[in-house]
Image: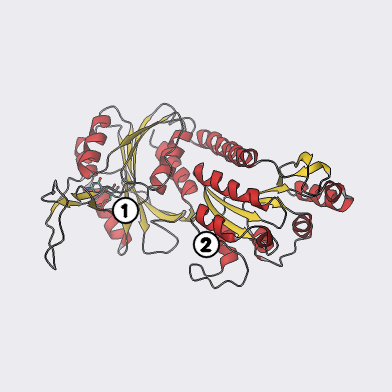
Amino acid sequence: MNVVLGVTGGIAAYKAVEITSRLKKAGFAVRVIMTRAAQEFVTPRPFAELSGERVVTSMWDDCTERHVEHIALADWADLLLVAPATANFIAKAAVGMADDMLTTVLLATKAPVMIAPAMNTDMLNNVATQKNIALLKERGVMIIEPAAGVLACGAVGAGRLPEPPTIVGEVKSFFDRRDNGVRSELINDCNGKLAGKKIIVTAGGTIAPIDPVRFIANRSGGKMGVATARAAAGAGANVVLVTGNITVALPTEPNIRLVSALTTDDMLKAVLAEFANADAVIMTAAVADYRVKDYSPQKIKKKANSFTLELVKNPDILRELGQQKQPGQILVGFAAETENLAEYAKRKLDEKNLDFIVANDVSRKDAGFDTDTNAAVIFYADGRAPEDFPLDSKDKLAGRIIRRLAEFF
Ligand code: C5P
């Protein structure tokens, strides 16, 4: 989940450093936007260190990563959190001004917005501020109520920024509420057909070890696989999630059992061990097609100027499952291609004896590896016309795949 954290210029800006750290530890990806005034209280450095990302401090930074940065950030966010939110920021938000990066992203984003007002009690109680907060609430902005206590200015009353664990707790419970909503929607849409079904999902890439310290890997981080496992669990299935090399946080749903399998051989064994009584397998993993022929049990030392590794073919897990599959078992494959998408995907559908295949063009910037969004075409074995799923979040695409899977039961 992606949180854009806006930090405005109040004395409590220092607490936003801890909020960043706690959000990261809780598994969120965080991008920080600081207003100019916020930088008078804290420098961008601790935010950059803790978020692992460049901090956005102005509309006019040279930015090589993104085209139109405010729109990219607005789209990237699953939640825009502003903590602390000053009276000035709240006033600008209420009238829809966009005179800096934070207010511009606020106007551009479709993501839910949560703000934590923090200021002197009199400023907070001022009719103007109260009206602005009420207006934002009316528009659906979530307000984290300020705490009471001794304020930086010496006054005693409401206006303190709640402690970072409280704010991060609000963020977590927002996502929990949202996920529960998505889950009940999924169960409804699937008519309960996946409830209690055993579904194996694979995620991430498998690796080919070279020696104890080196391996060959691919760019899959496991986002699509984990999203698919969560969607299947959300629809009521009992999921076995077999993970290769993944960079995303592991899901914690009680109906997802985790199995780790780093190499293709391990993944084959793990999947086969679960297959006999499984109702469906979704092979989202980017399985390494080759392994190193002679694994060196000792670290290979640097000697010659060139070095050749011999690779041998790995088993094809899906093809194996396709041969073993019994009536009633559904097999879903993925095809990540950079060219001839339809032709290659249809060939795999056929050769691996799949029920459907989700094909995505990984040469696109906004789809495939390392992105939160994906676009795909599903090809079916039953002769149905291929179905296009335009660019959307991986969570949403996973939900659509699971709805299609439910139709087979
Ligand atoms: O043949 P290709 O690797 O492109 O096929 C992709 C699909 O097959 C994916 O669903 C992937 O998880 C699966 N696969 C597999 N075993 C392999 C290679 C790919 O199960 N050795």
State whether residue 293 is above or below residue 26.
below
Residue at numbered disc 2: 54
Residue at numbered disc 1: 335
Coloring scheme used: secondary structure
Q: Position of residue 295 (x, y in %)?
A: 13, 48
The circle drawn on residue 127 is none
Q: CA distance from mark 1 to mark 2?
A: 33 Å
- For this view, does 306 lie left or right of residue 28? left
Q: Tag 2 or tag 1, which sits nearer the N-term?
A: 2
Toward the viewer: 332 or 50? 50
- For this view, does 244 lie left or right of residue 351? right
Q: Which amino acid, mark 2?
A: Arg
The answer to whether residue 160 shows anywhere in this view is: yes
> How many marks do you count on the picture?
2
Q: Which amino acid, mark 1?
A: Ala
Check the image and name the residue furthest to the front: 154
For the C terminus, the quadrant is: top left
Query: What's the residue at 25%, 49% (across, down)?
Result: 207
Query: What's the residue at 46%, 39% (across, down)?
Result: 231
Q: Position of residue 43 (x, y in %)?
A: 61, 60
Label 2: state its secondary structure: loop
Query: What's the residue at 61%, 65% (across, down)?
Result: 57
Callout 1: CB less than 8 Å from ligand 1: yes
